[in-house]
Image (cartoon, rainbow, N blue to C red):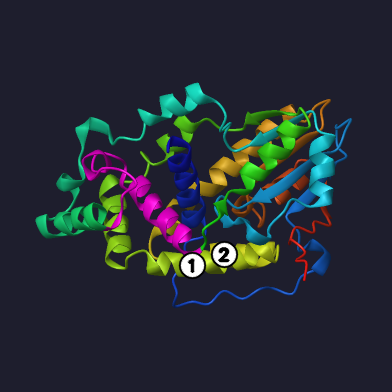
Amino acid sequence: MRKMMLLGLLVMVEMMAFAQSPKKKPTIKNSDPSENTLLWKISGGDLQKPSYLFGTMHLICADDIVLSDSLTKAIKGADNVYLELDMDNIMEMMGAMTKMKMRNDTTLEQLLSKEEYEKVKTFFTTKSSLLPFAMLETYKPLLAASLIMQQQGESSCSNMISMEQLVMKEAKSNGVKIKGIETMQYQMSIFDSIPYGFQAKQLLRMVEEDGKESGKEMEKITDAYRKQQLSLMEEITKSEDIGIGSFTDILLYNRNINWANQLKLLMQGKSLVVAVGAGHLPGEKGLINLLRKAGYKVEPVKNEMIRKRVI
């Protein structure tokens, strides 16, 4: 259950990074089809060995998704695999549980009107059995919102996984050590930078729509992901949003800068596979461009990951 909650939070971070208004339809730019990939090779500069950057999806239907031959080969030859979080670190996960609550004993009831609070309470009491509402009402509201998104995804597919799970399985089967580029405590702290009142209103909005609009948006994102269209993902990111966009620096761009700076050191003398949310890759402030600006050659690698069906 704890691991599923952490996956849910990763999904929320990803969804917020891609947040958009349904009133403005994103359009994909004309781009080199060879760059429609989630796997990128990093070389040149001061590197002795190449490393690889892979864009993940934190929650996706497993029925027709596999790791490509290119990615499995990169993992097999890697010294380490870096995910956003080391999800196998039990001690870190346990410590993160204490960071899920709002500061200063704040509760959801204090952030909403009586009518709004009862609406949220009724939703979680009658429609969600993931966690007791008495526990959720002290948690950061966007964590509770992530559970709605998780539940919405599970209703459309009985076999949901994260790409991180597949990467971890492949790394373990090849004896490659898995590490985290961030800590769970840090990811939790991000949500202390977003006003709790704002988070509560976002949770209320999701409850009122029963997660349906967010589910539709995730379908668009997932479709772009399956087609490996980073240009489309970038357009979604830039689309007019419903208020979340004011926190894009906190959720996305500042973290990209931190990661790029870390990778300059981590890649020295080693070959890494760095698998992070696909939303962190494209754009001027994305990891691909930041690494290129740092003097590295970052080039697309063919990445066939759609499962071939046997008829």
Residue with the mark numbered 2: 221
Q: Residues within 10 Å of mark 2 (few under 14, many from 20)?
A: many
Residue 241 appears anywhere in the view = no
Q: Which mark is residue 217?
A: 1
Residue reaching furthest top? 91
The residue under the point 62% across, 42% down is: 165
The residue under the point 76% across, 27% down is: 175
Q: Camera-side residue: 97 or 200?
A: 97
Q: Which residues are magenta?
A: 127-156
The type of residue carrying mark 1 is: Glu
Residue 80 figure quarter: top right
Residue reaching furthest front? 311
Q: Is residue 74 left or right of residue 219?
A: right
Q: In x, y percent, where is residue 35?
A: 79, 62
Q: Are marks 2 and 1 in contact (CB under 8 Å)?
A: yes
Q: Residues within 10 Å of mark 1 (few under 14, many from 20)?
A: some
The C terminus, quarter of image: bottom right
Q: Where is 229 relative to 286, above or below?
A: below
Q: Camera-side residue: 94 or 65?
A: 65
Q: In x, y percent, where is residue 97?
A: 38, 30
